[in-house]
């Protein structure tokens, strides 16, 4: 589990990636919207929030790199994905600020709409790539296939009979 969450080597399949991303989303909501912890000073709260944020970004980066490896892509694409996600946070902050009464010009409003369309298209592509596309079948340059848990047997399987099952042939004898 530690290698999955904190290491950058290897591959991970869609299911594990999605579980980690959903857990990060739930943790983010818990910490930022309704933190159950109360701190005696503002500095303690700030340090806690920074520590949690850095850990979550690290886990997000590590699992995204491994998912990209499963798609036989370089892990450096994770940098672009994380930048797009953070731009989305900034955008939605500006959008909610505009909605709740911030005074911005029409040109800035048009820029926000264009940014919304561009970020939505980018994020849709990222979700399709990381969640819906299957990984490379078999081993690739980043490691073995994470969906294959059992190694293939070195003994060749016995071929199935073409017609009547063997136990029936043995009971009835050979045809004359």
Image (tube, grey):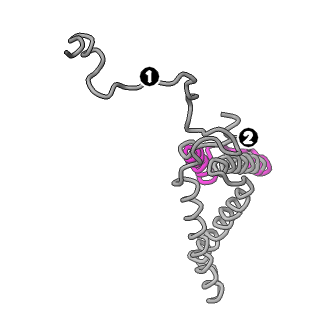
| Magenta region, main secondary structure | helix
Extreme front residue here?
Answer: 176
Q: Nearer the viewer, residue 56 or 124?
A: 124
Q: Residue at x 64, y 89 (%)?
A: 107
- Residue 123 visible to an observer of this rendering: yes
Residue 158: image x %, image y %?
A: 44, 22
Crowd rating for badge 2 (residues with CA inside 10 Å; few <14, some 14–19, many 20+): some
Q: Which mark is residue 7?
A: 2
Residue 117: image x %, image y %?
A: 57, 76
Crowd rating for badge 1 (residues with CA inside 10 Å; few <14, some 14–19, many 20+): few
Q: Which residues are magenta?
A: 17-46
Q: Quadrant of residue 99?
A: bottom right
| Chain-order first, disc 1 or disc 2 | 2
Assess whether residue 175 is covered by the magenta stretch: no
Is residue 151 toward the left or the right of residue 4 in the image? left
How far apart are the alpha carbons under marks 1 and 2? Answer: 41 Å
Image quadrant in which the C terminus is located = top left
Q: Residue at x 56, y 28 (%)?
A: 152
Q: Which mark is residue 158?
A: 1
Q: Give the foreground label among 1 and 2.
A: 1
């Amino acid at each position: 589990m530690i290698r999955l969450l904190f290491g950058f080597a290897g591959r991970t399949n869609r299911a594990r990636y999605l579980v980690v991303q959903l857990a990060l989303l739930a943790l983010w909501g818990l910490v930022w919207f309704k933190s159950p912890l109360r701190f005696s000073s503002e500095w303690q709260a700030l340090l806690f929030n920074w520590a949690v944020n850095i850990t979550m970004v690290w886990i997000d980066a590590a699992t995204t790199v491994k998912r990209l490896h499963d798609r036989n892509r370089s892990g450096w694409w994770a940098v672009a994905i994380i930048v797009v996600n953070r731009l989305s946070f900034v955008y939605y902050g500006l959008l909610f600020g505009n909605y709740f009464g911030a005074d911005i010009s029409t040109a800035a409003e048009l820029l926000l709409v264009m940014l919304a369309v561009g970020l939505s298209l980018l994020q849709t592509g990222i979700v399709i790539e990381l969640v819906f596309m299957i990984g490379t079948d078999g081993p690739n340059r980043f490691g073995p296939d994470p969906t294959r848990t059992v190694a293939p047997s070195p003994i060749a399987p016995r071929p199935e009979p073409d017609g009547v099952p063997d136990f029936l042939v043995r009971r009835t004898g050979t045809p004359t």
